[in-house]
C-alpha cells in the first residue's frame, strides 16, 4: 500500500535561482494493494513527479509518504521501496542495457547479487509472464516497440515488485504494441500486482478500476473512469480526452436525443442509438 | 504532381552481414497542396521513405522527384531536394541549439540568405504560424515546456517556407490539448498557403481527421492507398498490418452492421458521426 498525507514537492534550491515552484501540493492519496489505477492530466500537472515519489526516486518536501509502511527518508528502506515499486518508462529504446533479452532481464538481478539458480528461475518466470520466452536469445534492438516494452516489464518483474508504474509507457507505440502492453498490464493486475498507469489515452484509462485526474500539482478528480468521463462538461477546462463514444453520446444528448448515460462502451451506445432511430 | 516516388528500394548496409532491405519497389504520388498521412507499424519503412523525400537518404534503386528535382541512385548531391522540403523529426526539440527562440528560428532562413527586416518578419511570422506567443522570442528554447520546444522546432522549419512539410510523429508525448492545437495550426497553414503536408503518425484518429489521402506501409512496401474512408473500411487488412481503424470509424462500422448500409461508411470523426445521427434523428433523412 502506498500512502500519501499532505504531501508537497518542489525541487531544492539551485545556486542563484532559489527554491522552485511547488510541483505537487497537499496530496492525500492512498493506493491499495492489487489495485489497477490510471492517472491522467495535462503535461506539467505533476503525474510523473508523483510517480517518482512513489518509488523513492524523489523525496517529499513536506508531508508523509509511506510504501508498505516504509519511509523513503530512511536510507535502508529506500532501496527496498525501489525494489517493490518498479517503473516502466515512455521510450522503449532508453531502457535496454544488454545485447540479448535474457541478459537484459538478468541485469538488475546481477546488480543485487541474486544467486544463480534463483536468477534463472526468476528470468524464466518473468519472460513467461510477458510472453517473451521464445525470444530469449534475441537482440533487443531487433524487437518491435511492444516487445521492447514487454522486455522492460520483464526486467522489472524479475525484481519481484508488488507495484509497477507505467509512465506513458504506451505513448510511443504503434496500435499493436499498445495492445500488447495493455494486455500485459491486465494480466499483471489479475495476478495480483498493483498497476499504476499514467496515460493521456481515455480508452486506456477505461481499463483501470480507478482514475486520478491531476491538474497543477493536485488531484482534482478521483473515481471510476467511466463515471468521471460521463460528465465531460466538468472536465472541459482540463482538456482531458474522453472516450470517443462518450464524446459522441454527450454531443447527441445536447442536441436533445434521449440517450442514457449508462452505456459503458460503444456497442451499448450503438444499441441505444438503434433503438432510438429505428422507432422512426 | 508534387512528389513522385518510383520503384524506390533501399538497402541498409548492403554487402555486410547486417544488410537489411528497408524499402521494396515503392511507387507513390503526392499531389501538390494535399495533406497526406503515411501509416504503418514500427519498422514498416515509413521513416526510411520520408528520409528519401527529404533528401537525407539516397535510393538504392528507383527515384524520387520533388517538383523539378529528381534524385536516384546515381545522384551525387541530395541537397537540392532539401530546398523544397522541411522536416520536423519525431523529437524536433532535439534539433534546437541556439541561445534564444528567435535566433533558433532565424538559423534556417539566414542560411538561405535572408537578413535584416525580412528575416525579422520571417521569424515573427513563423512564431505566429507555430502558435508561439511573441513574448517568448528572447527566451532560451531550453527553458520552455516540451510542447513549446516542439513548436519552436517546427517554427524553425516553417521559417524556411518549405513547399512540402514532413512531420514525423509530431504529437508523440504531447497532451491531448497540445496535440490538437499543433495539428489545427498545421492544417490551417496547409489550407491558407497551399503547403503540401506529409504526416507520419501512429494515430489513426489524426490521419482520419486531417488527411485527404492515406498511404499504408507494411514491411517496406506500400500496401494500400486511398481516402481515409477507403483505407479505414479495410478492417481485416489493417489488423494484419498491425493497425486499426480509429474509434469513430469502428463505431461507424458497428452502426452499419446494426442499422444497415443506409449509414455511410465514411463517418470517421466524432463530429461527422454526431452530425449524421442528429440529422437522421430529426427526420431529415429517412431510415
Image: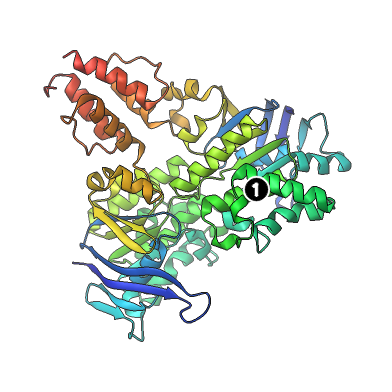
Quarter of the picture holding the C terminus of chain B? top left
Please rate how many residues cluster around mark 1, counting C-alpha atoms within 10 Å: few if below 14, some from 14 to 19, many from 20: many
Residue A15: tell me if it is visible.
Answer: no
Q: Position of residue B9 (x, y in %)?
A: 34, 73
Q: In this view of the protein, which residue sits in the foreground, B168 or B236?
A: B236
Q: Position of residue A164 (x, y in %)?
A: 67, 39
Q: Which residue is mark 1?
A: A127
Q: In this view of the protein, which residue sits in the foreground, B2 or A217?
A: B2
Q: Quadrant of residue A215?
A: top right
Q: Chain of mark 1?
A: A
Q: In this view of the protein, which residue sits in the foreground, B212 or B197?
A: B212
With B175 as the anchor, is B81 left or right in this view? left
Colour mapping used in the image? rainbow
Residue B102: tell me if it is visible.
Answer: yes
Label 1 element class: helix
Q: Is residue A250 above or below residue A178?
A: above
Quarter of the picture holding the N terminus of chain B? bottom left
Q: Quadrant of residue B151?
A: bottom left
With A136 as the anchor, is A159 left or right in this view? right
Q: In this view of the protein, which residue sits in the foreground, A69 or B136?
A: A69
With B285 as the anchor, is A54 left or right in this view? right
Q: Position of residue A271 (x, y in %)?
A: 31, 20
Q: Is residue B214 above or below residue B20?
A: above
- Residue at the (37%, 68%) spot, across then down: B23
- Residue at the (22%, 25%) spot, across then down: B277
With A127 as the anchor, is B127 left or right in this view? left
Amino acid at each position: 500500500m502506498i500512502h500519501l498525507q499532505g504531501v508537497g514537492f518542489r525541487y531544492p534550491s539551485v545556486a542563484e535561482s532559489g527554491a522552485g515552484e511547488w510541483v505537487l501540493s497537499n496530496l492525500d492519496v492512498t493506493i491499495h494493494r492489487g489495485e489497477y489505477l490510471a492517472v491522467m492530466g495535462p503535461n506539467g500537472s505533476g503525474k510523473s513527479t508523483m510517480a517518482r515519489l512513489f518509488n523513492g526516486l524523489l523525496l517529499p518536501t513536506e508531508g508523509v509518504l509511506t510504501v508498505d509502511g516504509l519511509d523513503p527518508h530512511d536510507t535502508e528502506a529506500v532501496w527496498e521501496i525501489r525494489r517493490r515499486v518498479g517503473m516502466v518508462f515512455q521510450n522503449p529504446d532508453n531502457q535496454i542495457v544488454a545485447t540479448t533479452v535474457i541478459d537484459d532481464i538478468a541485469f538488475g538481478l546481477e546488480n543485487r547479487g541474486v544467486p544463480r539458480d534463483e536468477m534463472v528461475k526468476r528470468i524464466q518466470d518473468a519472460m513467461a509472464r510477458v510472453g517473451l520466452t521464445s525470444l530469449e536469445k534475441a537482440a533487443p534492438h531487433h524487437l518491435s516497440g511492444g516487445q521492447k516494452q514487454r522486455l522492460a516489464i520483464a526486467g522489472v518483474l524479475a525484481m519481484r515488485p508488488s507495484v509497477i508504474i507505467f509512465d506513458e509507457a504506451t505513448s510511443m507505440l504503434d496500435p499493436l504494441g499498445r495492445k500488447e502492453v495493455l494486455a500485459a498490464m491486465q494480466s499483471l493486475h489479475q495476478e495480483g500486482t498493483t498497476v499504476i498507469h499514467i496515460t493521456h489515452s481515455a480508452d486506456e484509462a477505461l481499463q483501470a478500476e480507478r482514475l486520478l485526474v491531476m491538474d497543477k500539482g493536485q488531484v482534482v478528480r478521483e473515481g471510476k473512469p467511466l463515471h468521471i468521463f460521463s460528465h465531460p462538461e466538468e472536465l472541459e477546462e482540463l482538456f482531458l480526452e474522453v472516450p470517443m463514444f462518450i464524446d459522441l453520446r454527450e454531443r447527441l444528448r445536447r442536441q436533445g436525443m434521449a440517450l442514457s448515460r449508462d452505456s459503458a462502451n460503444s456497442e451499448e451506445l450503438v444499441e441505444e442509438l438503434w433503438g432510438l432511430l429505428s422507432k422512426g | 504532381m508534387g512528389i513522385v516516388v518510383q520503384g524506390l528500394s533501399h538497402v541498409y548496409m548492403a554487402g555486410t552481414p547486417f544488410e537489411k532491405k528497408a524499402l521494396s519497389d515503392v511507387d507513390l504520388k503526392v499531389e501538390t497542396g494535399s495533406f497526406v498521412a503515411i501509416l504503418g507499424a514500427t519498422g514498416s519503412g515509413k521513416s526510411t521513405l520520408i528520409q528519401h523525400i527529404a533528401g537525407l537518404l539516397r535510393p538504392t534503386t528507383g527515384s524520387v522527384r520533388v517538383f523539378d528535382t529528381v534524385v536516384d541512385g546515381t545522384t551525387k548531391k541530395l541537397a537540392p531536394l532539401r530546398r523544397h522540403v522541411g522536416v520536423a523529426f519525431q523529437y524536433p526539440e532535439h534539433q534546437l541549439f541556439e541561445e534564444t527562440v528567435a535566433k533558433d528560428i532565424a538559423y534556417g532562413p539566414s542560411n538561405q540568405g535572408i537578413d535584416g527586416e525580412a528575416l525579422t518578419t520571417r521569424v515573427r511570422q513563423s512564431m505566429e504560424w507555430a502558435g508561439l506567443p511573441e513574448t517568448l522570442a528572447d527566451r532560451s528554447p531550453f527553458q520552455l515546456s516540451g510542447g513549446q520546444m516542439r513548436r519552436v522546432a517546427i517554427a524553425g522549419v516553417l521559417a524556411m517556407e518549405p513547399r512540402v512539410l514532413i512531420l514525423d510523429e509530431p504529437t508523440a508525448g504531447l497532451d491531448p490539448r497540445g496535440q490538437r492545437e499543433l495539428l489545427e495550426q498545421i492544417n490551417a497553414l496547409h489550407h491558407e498557403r497551399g503547403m503540401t503536408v506529409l504526416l507520419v503518425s501512429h494515430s489513426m484518429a489524426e490521419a482520419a481527421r486531417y488527411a485527404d489521402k492515406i498511404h499504408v506501409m507494411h514491411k517496406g512496401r506500400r500496401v494500400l492507398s486511398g481516402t481515409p474512408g477507403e483505407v479505414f473500411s479495410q478492417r481485416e487488412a489493417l489488423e494484419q498490418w498491425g493497425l486499426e481503424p480509429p474509434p469513430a470509424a469502428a463505431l461507424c462500422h458497428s452502426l452499419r452492421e446494426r442499422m444497415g448500409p443506409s449509414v455511410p461508411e465514411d463517418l470517421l470523426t466524432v463530429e461527422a458521426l454526431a452530425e449524421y445521427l442528429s440529422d437522421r434523428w430529426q427526420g431529415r433523412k429517412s431510415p
